Image (cartoon, grey):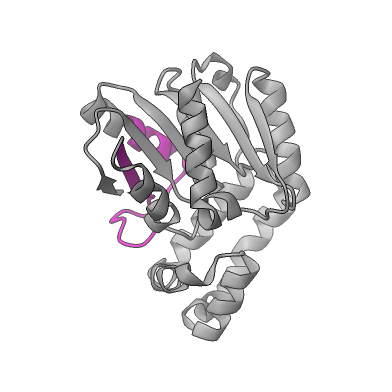
Amino acid sequence: MIYKEYGTGSSTIILLHGGGLSWWNYREEAELLQNEYHIILPVLDGHAASGRPFTTIEDNAAELITFIDEHFNGSVLLIGGLSLGAQILLEMLSQRQDITRHALVESASVLPSKVTNALIGPAFGSSYGLIKNRSFAKLQAESLHIRPELFEDYYRDTCLITKPDMIAFMKANTAYSLKDSIRESTADIHLYAGEKETGIIRKSVEQIHTTLPDSTVQILPGLYHGEFSLNHPDAYVQAVREILEH
């Protein structure tokens, strides 16, 4: 795992990108917040230039906790995460109850899908080569609702993800379930999802909120999976500021 850093503030915010993306998922948010906070954007294991293959969500969470222990005395102000990054965030909260004061969980799935999980290997075994085709990549980016300004970043870094890593983190994403130990978390937890998310994400939000009744839930009108942090950095930063003001 490698880390991109912005700002020199005394309070630290860590933002964890989605699967198949990279640190640029939150680049504009970091630029907007850098005058007030120290922003860290990790490149998750198995992603472009991370320097380490993807193993498990649990391993990524433990690696980040160790990083926080070594550099920030065991706790930071806020951690945010999208999709795979949100699952890693939930796992961090499960492994260490006081790892952060605030958590912004965007579009996390905690309901495993055995069928989807079983299909990932065969599907990517036959189609992986297409990711380096620009026309296919543009269609894929459009289907993921990634705004055009981010396409070159998306295409460059997707081409650098190996087939084993892509299969590994996608299988982990479809197999993750919430740990009971998250109930011990002392973090102020905020759940976000788009109105146009898949059913499994909406049901996951309900499951997390049921497990953590003190959490807040925001369903974002008109948005698809990942659009909040990827396509609306101003609104995302506003949400961060509101969380930190309470």
- Measuring 53% from the left and 60% from the top, which residue is drawn there? 167
Q: Percent x, y for residue 202? A: 74, 42
Residue nearest the viewer, comparing 130 with 117: 130
Q: Is residue 170 above or below residue 79?
A: below
Residue nearest the viewer, comparing 44 with 228: 228
Q: Percent x, y for residue 230? A: 52, 56
Q: Is 57 a magenta residue?
A: yes
Dividing the picture into quadrants, the one containing residue 118 is bottom right
Q: Is residue 10 above or below residue 204?
A: above
Q: Is 212 a magenta residue?
A: no
- Measuring 36% from the left and 62% from the top, which residue is drawn there? 48
From the viewer's perspective, is 229 left or right of 113? left
- Measuring 68% from the left and 62% from the top, which residue is drawn there? 119
Residue nearest the viewer, comparing 50 with 39: 39
Q: Percent x, y for residue 187? A: 49, 20
From the viewer's perspective, is 39 left or right of 108? left
Q: Percent x, y for residue 127? A: 58, 77
Regarding residue 54, the answer to whether it shows in the image is: no
Dividing the picture into quadrants, the one containing residue 75 is top left
Residues rendered magenta in the picture: 37-65
